[in-house]
Amino acid sequence: PCEWCGEFLLRQEFADHAAAHKGREAREVPRADTDPPKVPCDACGMMVPFETFADHAAAHRFQSEEVSASSSRPPDLLPCEWCGELLLRQEFADHVAAHKEREAKEASLENFNTPEVLAARLVEDLRSIAEPPGTDGQPVLPLGSVANFDLAVDFIACARKLRQSRGEVESKLEIVYHWTPRENFQNIIDGNLRVPDGKQVLTKTDQGFYGAGIYTSPDFNYGRAYAYGTGACFLCIAVPGRRYLASYPQNLGKPCHPGFDCHVSADGNQMEWVFFSSCQLLPCFLVEDATHALALATANKCLSWLSRDLGEGACHPISS
């Protein structure tokens, strides 16, 4: 403010304005009785001519309102393109860097947990435990592992799809058994257990008491008769999904009940589990009484990490 007239001025204008007042003072000899009356300003303490006091006070009010508005105005905030959060400018770079780091980790994890990568790891684990020579120079499991990489890829893709659609509880991995004659061994190892179609895959018994599908059991000893004396048992990892309690004769020769992923026999202590898609099963070992316990322990070790890693990564299509 000008000390002569009380006017508020820009800093660059102040010197010229003050010089003009001083020049006027030099030309005029003020007389006490003709000087305009002055009033003290409560805001700045200056003596302000009475006729300009109202403007001087109004200028103080305006300046006070601007300061108040400036202090209550929110700081400049920047929106995050990942999460939409509004951030202070000084916080923005660190926040974005954290998003990028998390994105990179997730991409790396997804690449690490593709069905192909998990299948390679699973087959390698099954074989490395089963096939090293034992103390007598023979493989720990004489027949080794029958795990097939291509079948493992389809199984993991199917299991992950069920995990995402059914949830962790209904997509829990299980161990099931399938006894069969010796002449079927190689076809199962190469092409998996398959649903009877009456043409390429035939059944030796009936249409399927609990549905027209692949019959397995959670009990190793159940179904021994189907080996017909010369066969053995396939130990499989399975993903049953949502289970339908099927009964005879209502489900004789029937397809999978709508809204479910497999059938479980309602009678016989639920010892028969029927699958309608080969990719829900992965044959791991061909076992007999002497090798069953070791094969089961090996499969269970793999289930522990596979069950965990199934929930991480994207769902991939299942090959036909």
Image (cartoon, grey):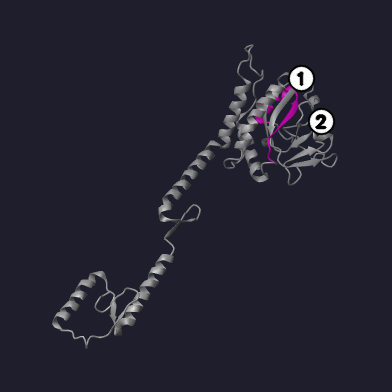
Numbered disc 2: secondary structure: loop
Callouts 2 and 1 close, C-beta under 8 Å: no
Vertical order, 194 against 99 (above or below):
above
Identified at 27% across, 85% down, the residue is 37
Distance, label 2 to label 1, CA atoms, is 17 Å
Q: Amino acid at mark 1?
A: Thr
- Within 10 Å of disc 2 (Cα), the crowding (few <14, some 14-19, many 20+) is few
Q: Amino acid at mark 2?
A: Thr
Q: Is residue 294 left or right of residue 8?
A: right
- In the rendered structure, which segment of residues is drawn in magenta? 170-192
Identified at 35% across, 76% down, the residue is 42
Q: Nearer the viewer, residue 84 or 30?
A: 30
Residue 228 location, x and y as percent?
79, 23
- Residue 211 visible in rendering: no
Quadrant where the N terminus sits is bottom left
Residue identifier under label 1 = 230
Quadrant where the C terminus sits is top right
Q: Earlier in the sequence, mark 2 or mark 1?
A: 2
- Residue 299 visible in rendering: yes
Vertical order, 19 against 31 (above or below):
above
Residue 197 location, x and y as percent?
74, 36
